[in-house]
Image (cartoon, helix red, strand yellow):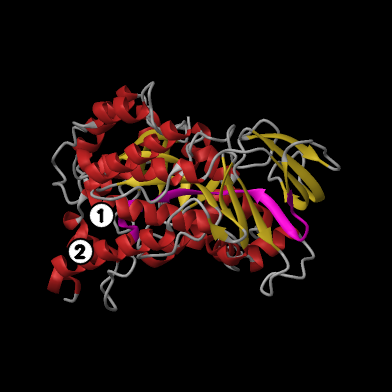
Protein backbone atom coordinates (compact mmCIF):
# COMPACT_ATOMS: atom_id res chain seq x y z
CA UNK A 1 0.00 0.00 0.00
CA UNK A 2 2.79 2.43 0.90
CA UNK A 3 4.62 1.59 -2.31
CA UNK A 4 1.47 2.27 -4.31
CA UNK A 5 0.95 5.62 -2.61
CA UNK A 6 4.56 6.69 -3.23
CA UNK A 7 4.23 5.64 -6.86
CA UNK A 8 1.06 7.73 -7.22
CA UNK A 9 2.78 10.79 -5.76
CA UNK A 10 5.79 10.35 -8.09
CA UNK A 11 3.43 9.88 -11.06
CA UNK A 12 1.47 13.03 -10.19
CA UNK A 13 4.71 14.99 -9.98
CA UNK A 14 5.90 13.61 -13.30
CA UNK A 15 2.63 14.56 -14.99
CA UNK A 16 2.95 18.10 -13.64
CA UNK A 17 6.46 18.40 -15.01
CA UNK A 18 5.42 17.02 -18.38
CA UNK A 19 2.53 19.47 -18.74
CA UNK A 20 4.13 22.67 -17.50
CA UNK A 21 7.82 22.03 -16.98
CA UNK A 22 7.08 22.55 -13.28
CA UNK A 23 7.30 20.05 -10.41
CA UNK A 24 4.36 19.81 -8.03
CA UNK A 25 5.10 22.55 -5.51
CA UNK A 26 2.05 21.78 -3.40
CA UNK A 27 0.17 18.52 -3.09
CA UNK A 28 -2.62 16.94 -1.09
CA UNK A 29 -0.07 14.42 0.16
CA UNK A 30 1.36 17.29 2.24
CA UNK A 31 -1.97 18.14 3.92
CA UNK A 32 -4.37 15.31 4.66
CA UNK A 33 -7.82 15.95 6.09
CA UNK A 34 -8.10 15.33 9.83
CA UNK A 35 -10.42 15.67 12.80
CA UNK A 36 -9.76 18.41 15.33
CA UNK A 37 -11.16 19.90 18.52
CA UNK A 38 -10.26 23.59 18.49
CA UNK A 39 -10.57 24.45 22.15
CA UNK A 40 -10.90 27.60 24.22
CA UNK A 41 -10.77 30.31 21.55
CA UNK A 42 -12.73 33.50 20.99
CA UNK A 43 -14.98 32.45 18.09
CA UNK A 44 -16.23 34.98 15.52
CA UNK A 45 -18.88 32.80 13.89
CA UNK A 46 -20.15 35.47 11.42
CA UNK A 47 -23.51 33.79 11.98
CA UNK A 48 -26.08 36.38 13.01
CA UNK A 49 -28.00 33.89 15.13
CA UNK A 50 -24.90 32.92 17.13
CA UNK A 51 -22.72 36.03 17.03
CA UNK A 52 -19.24 36.15 18.52
CA UNK A 53 -18.52 33.79 21.41
CA UNK A 54 -15.94 35.09 23.92
CA UNK A 55 -14.89 31.52 24.70
CA UNK A 56 -15.92 28.39 22.82
CA UNK A 57 -14.78 25.19 21.12
CA UNK A 58 -15.17 24.07 17.50
CA UNK A 59 -15.23 20.38 16.60
CA UNK A 60 -14.16 19.50 13.07
CA UNK A 61 -14.60 15.99 11.78
CA UNK A 62 -13.78 14.83 8.25
CA UNK A 63 -13.82 18.37 6.88
CA UNK A 64 -17.16 19.32 8.46
CA UNK A 65 -17.88 21.69 11.35
CA UNK A 66 -19.65 19.20 13.56
CA UNK A 67 -20.24 21.22 16.74
CA UNK A 68 -19.72 24.70 18.19
CA UNK A 69 -20.06 25.25 21.92
CA UNK A 70 -18.46 25.23 25.35
CA UNK A 71 -16.76 22.23 26.94
CA UNK A 72 -16.95 19.96 23.92
CA UNK A 73 -15.48 16.48 24.17
CA UNK A 74 -14.32 14.29 21.30
CA UNK A 75 -12.07 11.39 22.31
CA UNK A 76 -9.49 10.40 19.74
CA UNK A 77 -9.30 13.68 17.80
CA UNK A 78 -6.38 16.08 17.79
CA UNK A 79 -6.84 18.99 20.19
CA UNK A 80 -5.75 22.43 19.01
CA UNK A 81 -5.34 24.85 21.90
CA UNK A 82 -6.88 28.17 20.85
CA UNK A 83 -6.16 30.02 24.10
CA UNK A 84 -5.23 33.62 23.19
CA UNK A 85 -6.48 32.94 19.67
CA UNK A 86 -9.41 34.22 17.60
CA UNK A 87 -11.13 31.50 15.61
CA UNK A 88 -13.06 32.74 12.58
CA UNK A 89 -14.05 31.73 9.04
CA UNK A 90 -11.37 31.97 6.39
CA UNK A 91 -11.60 35.03 4.16
CA UNK A 92 -13.23 34.98 0.73
CA UNK A 93 -11.62 37.09 -2.01
CA UNK A 94 -14.36 37.55 -4.62
CA UNK A 95 -12.25 38.94 -7.50
CA UNK A 96 -8.55 38.31 -8.10
CA UNK A 97 -6.67 37.97 -11.40
CA UNK A 98 -4.32 35.26 -10.23
CA UNK A 99 -2.55 34.84 -13.56
CA UNK A 100 -0.87 38.23 -12.97
CA UNK A 101 0.21 37.68 -9.36
CA UNK A 102 3.86 37.62 -10.44
CA UNK A 103 3.39 41.04 -12.07
CA UNK A 104 3.07 42.95 -8.82
CA UNK A 105 6.09 45.13 -9.57
CA UNK A 106 5.73 45.50 -13.33
CA UNK A 107 4.54 49.07 -12.78
CA UNK A 108 8.11 50.30 -13.05
CA UNK A 109 7.69 54.04 -12.74
CA UNK A 110 5.28 56.74 -11.61
CA UNK A 111 2.41 57.12 -14.05
CA UNK A 112 2.96 53.67 -15.58
CA UNK A 113 0.13 51.94 -13.76
CA UNK A 114 -1.86 48.74 -14.01
CA UNK A 115 -3.32 49.06 -17.50
CA UNK A 116 -0.10 50.03 -19.34
CA UNK A 117 1.85 47.34 -17.48
CA UNK A 118 -0.75 44.70 -18.28
CA UNK A 119 -0.82 45.81 -21.91
CA UNK A 120 2.95 45.49 -22.16
CA UNK A 121 3.16 42.02 -20.63
CA UNK A 122 -0.08 40.01 -20.90
CA UNK A 123 0.84 38.44 -24.26
CA UNK A 124 4.19 37.22 -22.90
CA UNK A 125 2.94 34.76 -20.28
CA UNK A 126 3.56 31.09 -21.01
CA UNK A 127 1.58 28.23 -19.42
CA UNK A 128 4.49 27.73 -17.04
CA UNK A 129 4.24 31.40 -16.02
CA UNK A 130 0.52 30.92 -15.35
CA UNK A 131 1.22 27.90 -13.16
CA UNK A 132 3.91 29.75 -11.23
CA UNK A 133 1.77 32.85 -10.82
CA UNK A 134 -1.41 31.10 -9.68
CA UNK A 135 0.44 28.94 -7.18
CA UNK A 136 2.31 31.97 -5.83
CA UNK A 137 -1.00 33.81 -5.46
CA UNK A 138 -2.71 30.89 -3.75
CA UNK A 139 0.16 30.38 -1.30
CA UNK A 140 0.08 34.09 -0.42
CA UNK A 141 -3.68 33.92 0.06
CA UNK A 142 -3.38 30.93 2.39
CA UNK A 143 -0.63 32.65 4.37
CA UNK A 144 -2.95 35.62 4.95
CA UNK A 145 -5.99 33.57 5.95
CA UNK A 146 -7.92 33.55 2.67
CA UNK A 147 -9.47 30.13 2.11
CA UNK A 148 -11.66 30.85 -0.94
CA UNK A 149 -10.80 32.85 -4.05
CA UNK A 150 -12.52 33.80 -7.29
CA UNK A 151 -9.84 33.36 -9.93
CA UNK A 152 -11.02 35.84 -12.57
CA UNK A 153 -8.91 34.49 -15.42
CA UNK A 154 -9.17 37.26 -17.98
CA UNK A 155 -6.18 36.22 -20.07
CA UNK A 156 -6.89 32.56 -20.90
CA UNK A 157 -4.45 32.38 -23.78
CA UNK A 158 -4.65 28.68 -24.74
CA UNK A 159 -5.80 25.27 -23.51
CA UNK A 160 -2.36 24.79 -21.97
CA UNK A 161 -2.73 28.05 -20.03
CA UNK A 162 -6.09 26.94 -18.63
CA UNK A 163 -4.66 23.56 -17.66
CA UNK A 164 -1.71 25.23 -15.93
CA UNK A 165 -4.00 27.40 -13.81
CA UNK A 166 -6.22 24.49 -12.86
CA UNK A 167 -3.22 22.33 -12.00
CA UNK A 168 -2.09 25.06 -9.62
CA UNK A 169 -5.58 25.17 -8.12
CA UNK A 170 -5.58 21.43 -7.61
CA UNK A 171 -2.29 21.62 -5.77
CA UNK A 172 -3.15 24.73 -3.75
CA UNK A 173 -6.05 23.04 -1.88
CA UNK A 174 -7.91 26.36 -1.66
CA UNK A 175 -11.62 26.59 -2.35
CA UNK A 176 -12.18 28.55 -5.55
CA UNK A 177 -14.20 29.53 -8.55
CA UNK A 178 -12.22 29.38 -11.78
CA UNK A 179 -13.82 31.84 -14.19
CA UNK A 180 -12.66 30.93 -17.68
CA UNK A 181 -12.17 34.04 -19.78
CA UNK A 182 -10.83 35.60 -22.93
CA UNK A 183 -7.40 36.29 -24.36
CA UNK A 184 -6.32 39.72 -23.17
CA UNK A 185 -6.27 42.43 -25.86
CA UNK A 186 -8.50 40.54 -28.28
CA UNK A 187 -10.38 42.95 -30.59
CA UNK A 188 -13.52 44.46 -29.09
CA UNK A 189 -15.65 43.35 -32.03
CA UNK A 190 -14.38 39.77 -32.01
CA UNK A 191 -16.70 37.20 -30.47
CA UNK A 192 -15.09 34.98 -27.81
CA UNK A 193 -16.30 31.50 -28.71
CA UNK A 194 -14.84 29.75 -25.64
CA UNK A 195 -13.66 26.97 -27.96
CA UNK A 196 -11.87 25.00 -25.23
CA UNK A 197 -14.55 25.36 -22.56
CA UNK A 198 -16.23 22.02 -23.25
CA UNK A 199 -12.93 20.17 -22.81
CA UNK A 200 -12.07 22.07 -19.62
CA UNK A 201 -15.53 21.37 -18.26
CA UNK A 202 -15.27 17.66 -19.06
CA UNK A 203 -11.68 17.03 -17.96
CA UNK A 204 -11.50 19.26 -14.91
CA UNK A 205 -15.09 19.50 -13.65
CA UNK A 206 -16.72 16.27 -14.83
CA UNK A 207 -17.46 13.08 -12.92
CA UNK A 208 -13.75 12.31 -12.52
CA UNK A 209 -12.72 15.83 -11.57
CA UNK A 210 -9.26 15.94 -9.96
CA UNK A 211 -10.27 19.06 -7.99
CA UNK A 212 -11.94 17.17 -5.12
CA UNK A 213 -14.99 19.42 -5.17
CA UNK A 214 -12.99 22.46 -4.04
CA UNK A 215 -13.11 24.37 -7.34
CA UNK A 216 -16.17 25.18 -9.44
CA UNK A 217 -16.33 26.60 -12.94
CA UNK A 218 -17.56 29.99 -14.07
CA UNK A 219 -17.21 32.37 -17.01
CA UNK A 220 -15.99 35.92 -17.11
CA UNK A 221 -17.01 38.11 -20.02
CA UNK A 222 -15.31 41.26 -21.21
CA UNK A 223 -18.64 43.02 -20.89
CA UNK A 224 -19.24 46.36 -22.58
CA UNK A 225 -16.01 47.65 -21.04
CA UNK A 226 -13.78 45.70 -23.44
CA UNK A 227 -16.15 44.52 -26.17
CA UNK A 228 -18.86 46.07 -28.28
CA UNK A 229 -22.45 46.00 -27.05
CA UNK A 230 -23.36 43.54 -29.80
CA UNK A 231 -20.53 41.17 -28.89
CA UNK A 232 -21.34 41.37 -25.18
CA UNK A 233 -24.98 40.41 -25.73
CA UNK A 234 -24.00 37.59 -28.09
CA UNK A 235 -21.55 36.25 -25.51
CA UNK A 236 -24.26 36.50 -22.86
CA UNK A 237 -26.47 34.22 -24.96
CA UNK A 238 -23.70 31.64 -24.87
CA UNK A 239 -23.16 32.19 -21.14
CA UNK A 240 -26.84 31.77 -20.30
CA UNK A 241 -27.01 28.60 -22.39
CA UNK A 242 -23.95 27.20 -20.59
CA UNK A 243 -25.65 27.44 -17.20
CA UNK A 244 -22.41 28.68 -15.64
CA UNK A 245 -22.14 31.65 -13.27
CA UNK A 246 -20.99 34.83 -15.02
CA UNK A 247 -18.84 37.77 -13.95
CA UNK A 248 -18.15 41.10 -15.68
CA UNK A 249 -16.24 44.28 -14.93
CA UNK A 250 -17.91 47.66 -14.92
CA UNK A 251 -15.71 50.34 -16.50
CA UNK A 252 -13.23 52.11 -14.26
CA UNK A 253 -12.78 54.79 -16.90
CA UNK A 254 -15.57 56.93 -18.36
CA UNK A 255 -18.01 56.47 -19.89
CA UNK A 256 -19.99 53.96 -17.83
CA UNK A 257 -21.82 51.64 -20.20
CA UNK A 258 -23.04 48.95 -17.81
CA UNK A 259 -26.82 49.28 -17.62
CA UNK A 260 -28.27 47.13 -14.84
CA UNK A 261 -31.84 48.07 -15.67
CA UNK A 262 -31.37 46.84 -19.21
CA UNK A 263 -29.68 43.68 -17.96
CA UNK A 264 -32.60 43.05 -15.61
CA UNK A 265 -35.02 43.30 -18.54
CA UNK A 266 -32.88 40.88 -20.54
CA UNK A 267 -32.79 38.37 -17.68
CA UNK A 268 -29.05 38.63 -17.07
CA UNK A 269 -29.10 39.68 -13.43
CA UNK A 270 -29.36 37.28 -10.52
CA UNK A 271 -27.26 35.43 -7.92
CA UNK A 272 -25.18 33.89 -10.73
CA UNK A 273 -24.17 37.23 -12.33
CA UNK A 274 -21.40 39.15 -10.55
CA UNK A 275 -20.33 42.73 -11.27
CA UNK A 276 -17.01 44.16 -10.11
CA UNK A 277 -16.10 47.86 -9.94
CA UNK A 278 -19.69 49.11 -10.25
CA UNK A 279 -18.77 52.47 -8.74
CA UNK A 280 -20.82 54.49 -11.28
CA UNK A 281 -24.07 52.58 -10.65
CA UNK A 282 -27.12 54.83 -10.36
CA UNK A 283 -29.75 54.38 -7.62
CA UNK A 284 -31.96 52.72 -10.24
CA UNK A 285 -29.13 50.33 -11.21
CA UNK A 286 -28.55 49.42 -7.57
CA UNK A 287 -32.27 48.86 -7.02
CA UNK A 288 -32.26 46.42 -9.95
CA UNK A 289 -29.33 44.55 -8.41
CA UNK A 290 -31.12 44.40 -5.06
CA UNK A 291 -34.34 43.07 -6.63
CA UNK A 292 -32.45 40.30 -8.39
CA UNK A 293 -29.94 39.55 -5.59
CA UNK A 294 -27.04 40.22 -7.95
CA UNK A 295 -23.66 40.15 -6.13
CA UNK A 296 -21.17 43.00 -6.18
CA UNK A 297 -17.43 42.75 -5.71
CA UNK A 298 -15.85 45.89 -4.26
CA UNK A 299 -12.07 46.07 -4.69
CA UNK A 300 -11.51 48.95 -2.29
CA UNK A 301 -7.95 49.84 -3.29
CA UNK A 302 -8.69 49.54 -6.99
CA UNK A 303 -11.89 51.59 -6.77
CA UNK A 304 -9.91 54.44 -5.23
CA UNK A 305 -6.82 54.14 -7.40
CA UNK A 306 -8.33 53.47 -10.83
CA UNK A 307 -11.98 54.45 -10.85
CA UNK A 308 -12.53 57.55 -12.94
CA UNK A 309 -16.28 56.97 -13.08
CA UNK A 310 -17.27 58.01 -9.57
CA UNK A 311 -16.45 58.39 -5.90
CA UNK A 312 -15.72 55.06 -4.23
CA UNK A 313 -16.90 56.25 -0.81
CA UNK A 314 -20.20 57.52 -2.21
CA UNK A 315 -20.60 54.25 -4.14
CA UNK A 316 -20.04 52.16 -1.02
CA UNK A 317 -22.71 54.06 0.90
CA UNK A 318 -25.11 53.87 -2.04
CA UNK A 319 -24.63 50.11 -2.27
CA UNK A 320 -25.34 49.73 1.45
CA UNK A 321 -28.40 51.99 1.21
CA UNK A 322 -29.77 49.78 -1.58
CA UNK A 323 -29.54 46.77 0.72
CA UNK A 324 -26.85 44.99 -1.30
CA UNK A 325 -24.46 42.44 0.19
CA UNK A 326 -21.07 43.83 -0.85
CA UNK A 327 -18.09 41.48 -0.97
CA UNK A 328 -14.43 42.50 -0.84
CA UNK A 329 -11.70 41.70 -3.33
CA UNK A 330 -8.18 42.63 -4.32
CA UNK A 331 -8.33 42.81 -8.16
CA UNK A 332 -4.62 42.57 -9.11
CA UNK A 333 -1.32 42.61 -7.23
CA UNK A 334 -0.01 45.65 -9.14
CA UNK A 335 -2.86 47.63 -7.54
CA UNK A 336 -3.05 46.15 -4.06
CA UNK A 337 -1.91 43.05 -2.16
CA UNK A 338 -4.48 40.26 -1.79
CA UNK A 339 -4.54 40.99 1.94
CA UNK A 340 -8.04 40.83 3.39
CA UNK A 341 -6.94 42.36 6.69
CA UNK A 342 -5.83 45.43 4.77
CA UNK A 343 -8.98 45.42 2.63
CA UNK A 344 -11.21 45.28 5.71
CA UNK A 345 -9.28 47.99 7.52
CA UNK A 346 -9.23 50.26 4.46
CA UNK A 347 -12.96 49.77 3.85
CA UNK A 348 -13.76 50.40 7.50
CA UNK A 349 -11.78 53.64 7.46
CA UNK A 350 -13.40 54.62 4.16
CA UNK A 351 -16.89 54.05 5.51
CA UNK A 352 -17.44 57.37 7.29
CA UNK A 353 -20.37 59.58 6.14
CA UNK A 354 -19.57 62.92 4.57
CA UNK A 355 -21.37 66.08 5.60
CA UNK A 356 -23.18 67.73 2.71
CA UNK A 357 -23.42 64.50 0.66
CA UNK A 358 -26.13 61.81 0.36
CA UNK A 359 -24.23 59.77 2.96
CA UNK A 360 -24.67 62.47 5.64
CA UNK A 361 -26.51 60.98 8.57
CA UNK A 362 -25.90 57.40 7.45
CA UNK A 363 -24.58 54.78 9.84
CA UNK A 364 -20.78 54.46 9.56
CA UNK A 365 -19.44 51.15 8.30
CA UNK A 366 -18.71 48.96 11.33
CA UNK A 367 -16.11 46.32 12.06
CA UNK A 368 -18.63 43.48 12.02
CA UNK A 369 -19.91 44.67 8.67
CA UNK A 370 -16.50 44.56 6.99
CA UNK A 371 -15.85 41.11 8.47
CA UNK A 372 -19.08 39.99 6.81
CA UNK A 373 -17.91 41.59 3.54
CA UNK A 374 -14.67 39.60 3.77
CA UNK A 375 -16.29 36.26 4.65
CA UNK A 376 -19.98 35.35 4.29
CA UNK A 377 -20.80 38.02 1.70
CA UNK A 378 -18.02 36.73 -0.53
CA UNK A 379 -19.18 33.16 -0.04
CA UNK A 380 -22.74 34.10 -1.03
CA UNK A 381 -21.44 36.06 -4.04
CA UNK A 382 -19.77 32.87 -5.28
CA UNK A 383 -22.80 30.67 -4.58
CA UNK A 384 -21.06 29.08 -1.59
CA UNK A 385 -23.06 30.60 1.26
CA UNK A 386 -24.24 27.15 2.40
CA UNK A 387 -20.69 25.78 2.25
CA UNK A 388 -18.33 28.34 3.78
CA UNK A 389 -18.04 31.92 5.04
CA UNK A 390 -19.28 31.36 8.60
CA UNK A 391 -18.75 28.93 11.46
CA UNK A 392 -22.00 27.00 11.46
CA UNK A 393 -22.58 23.34 12.20
CA UNK A 394 -22.76 21.39 8.95
CA UNK A 395 -20.64 23.77 6.88
CA UNK A 396 -17.20 22.83 5.63
CA UNK A 397 -14.27 23.54 7.91
CA UNK A 398 -12.62 26.59 6.29
CA UNK A 399 -11.20 28.22 9.40
CA UNK A 400 -8.34 30.39 10.59
CA UNK A 401 -6.79 30.96 14.00
CA UNK A 402 -5.34 34.39 14.69
CA UNK A 403 -2.87 34.98 17.51
CA UNK A 404 -3.87 37.72 19.95
CA UNK A 405 -0.72 37.70 22.09
CA UNK A 406 1.43 39.33 19.39
CA UNK A 407 2.69 42.87 19.94
CA UNK A 408 0.61 44.42 17.16
CA UNK A 409 -2.77 43.01 18.20
CA UNK A 410 -2.88 42.41 21.95
CA UNK A 411 -4.24 43.08 24.46
CA UNK A 412 -7.67 42.33 23.01
CA UNK A 413 -10.84 43.89 24.34
CA UNK A 414 -13.19 43.08 21.45
CA UNK A 415 -12.29 40.26 19.07
CA UNK A 416 -13.93 41.78 15.97
CA UNK A 417 -12.33 45.17 16.54
CA UNK A 418 -8.94 43.51 17.01
CA UNK A 419 -9.23 41.66 13.69
CA UNK A 420 -10.18 44.77 11.70
CA UNK A 421 -8.10 47.44 13.41
CA UNK A 422 -4.94 45.48 14.21
CA UNK A 423 -4.82 42.07 12.52
CA UNK A 424 -2.36 41.10 9.81
CA UNK A 425 -1.23 38.03 7.90
CA UNK A 426 1.65 37.72 10.40
CA UNK A 427 -0.88 37.00 13.15
CA UNK A 428 -2.49 34.09 11.26
CA UNK A 429 -1.29 31.00 13.06
CA UNK A 430 -3.44 28.27 11.52
CA UNK A 431 -5.31 27.98 8.22
CA UNK A 432 -7.66 25.09 7.51
CA UNK A 433 -9.52 24.45 4.25
CA UNK A 434 -12.07 21.65 4.08
CA UNK A 435 -10.51 20.14 7.19
CA UNK A 436 -6.96 20.20 5.82
CA UNK A 437 -4.36 22.31 7.61
CA UNK A 438 -2.37 24.46 5.17
CA UNK A 439 -0.69 26.68 7.75
CA UNK A 440 0.29 25.64 11.28
CA UNK A 441 2.33 27.42 13.89
CA UNK A 442 2.50 30.46 11.64
CA UNK A 443 4.22 28.49 8.86
CA UNK A 444 2.80 27.23 5.56
CA UNK A 445 3.03 23.44 5.69
CA UNK A 446 1.24 22.50 2.45
CA UNK A 447 3.56 24.35 0.08
CA UNK A 448 7.20 24.29 -0.92
CA UNK A 449 7.48 28.04 -0.39
CA UNK A 450 11.13 28.51 -1.43
CA UNK A 451 10.52 26.63 -4.69
CA UNK A 452 7.34 28.62 -5.39
CA UNK A 453 9.23 31.87 -4.88
CA UNK A 454 12.18 30.74 -6.98
CA UNK A 455 9.99 29.77 -9.94
CA UNK A 456 7.83 32.91 -9.62
CA UNK A 457 10.97 35.06 -9.70
CA UNK A 458 12.22 33.26 -12.81
CA UNK A 459 8.91 33.85 -14.60
CA UNK A 460 8.75 37.51 -13.59
CA UNK A 461 12.33 38.18 -14.66
CA UNK A 462 11.79 36.47 -18.01
CA UNK A 463 8.61 38.47 -18.71
CA UNK A 464 10.24 41.77 -17.71
CA UNK A 465 13.19 41.02 -19.98
CA UNK A 466 10.89 40.10 -22.87
CA UNK A 467 8.87 43.30 -22.42
CA UNK A 468 12.09 45.30 -22.42
CA UNK A 469 11.70 49.01 -23.01
CA UNK A 470 7.90 48.76 -22.94
CA UNK A 471 8.03 48.57 -19.14
CA UNK A 472 10.30 51.59 -18.92
CA UNK A 473 8.67 54.01 -21.33
Residue 95 is a magenta residue: yes
* Horizontal relation, residue 150 to residue 380: left or right: left
Q: Is residue 371 visible?
A: yes
Q: Nearer the viewer, residue 257 or 274?
A: 274
Q: Is residue 281 visible?
A: no
Element under label 1? helix
Q: Nearer the viewer, residue 447 or 320?
A: 447
Element under label 2? helix
Residue at left 24%, top 33%?
A: 235
Read off the magenta span: 80-101
In the rendered image, residue 64, in percent from the top left (x then y), is placed at 64, 33
Q: Nearer the viewer, residue 352 or 328?
A: 328
Point out the image quarter for the C terminus.
Answer: bottom left
* Horizontal relation, residue 403 to residue 94: left or right: right
Residue with the mark numbered 1: 129
Q: Is residue 344 above or below residue 233?
A: below
Residue 53 is a magenta residue: no
Q: Is residue 473 above or below residue 347?
A: below
In the rendered image, residue 396, in percent from the top left (x then y), is placed at 60, 35
Q: Mark 2 and mark 1 in contact (Cβ < 8 Å)?
A: yes
In the rendered image, residue 209, in percent from the top left (x then y), is placed at 38, 28
Report the Cα–Cα distance between label 1 and label 2: 9 Å
* Horizontal relation, residue 200 to residue 193: left or right: right
Which of the 4 quarters of the picture holds residue 324? top right
Residue at left 73%, top 58%?
A: 85
* Horizontal relation, residue 163 to residue 205: left or right: left
Give me the disc on residue 463: 2
In the rendered image, residue 307, in percent from the top left (x then y), is placed at 37, 61
Does label 1 or label 2 sit earlier along the sequence? Answer: 1
Give me the disc on residue 468: none
At label 2, counting other C-alpha atoms closer than 10 Å, the crowd grade (few under 14, some 14-19, many 20 or more) is many
Q: Is residue 49 above or below residue 456?
A: above
Amino acid sequence: MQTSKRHFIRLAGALAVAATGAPALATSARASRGSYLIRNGAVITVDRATGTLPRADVLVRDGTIEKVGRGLRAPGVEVIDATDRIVMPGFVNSHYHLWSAIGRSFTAREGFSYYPAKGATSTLYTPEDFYNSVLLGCAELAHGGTTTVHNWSHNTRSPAHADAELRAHRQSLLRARYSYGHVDQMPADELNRYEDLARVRRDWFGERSPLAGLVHLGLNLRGPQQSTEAVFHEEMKFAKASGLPVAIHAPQEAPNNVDALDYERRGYLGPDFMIAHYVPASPADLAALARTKTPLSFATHSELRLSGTGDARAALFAMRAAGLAVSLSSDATSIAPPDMFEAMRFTWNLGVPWAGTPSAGARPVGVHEVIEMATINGAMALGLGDVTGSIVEGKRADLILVRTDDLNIGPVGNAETAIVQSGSAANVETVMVDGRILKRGGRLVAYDTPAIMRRARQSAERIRAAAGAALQS
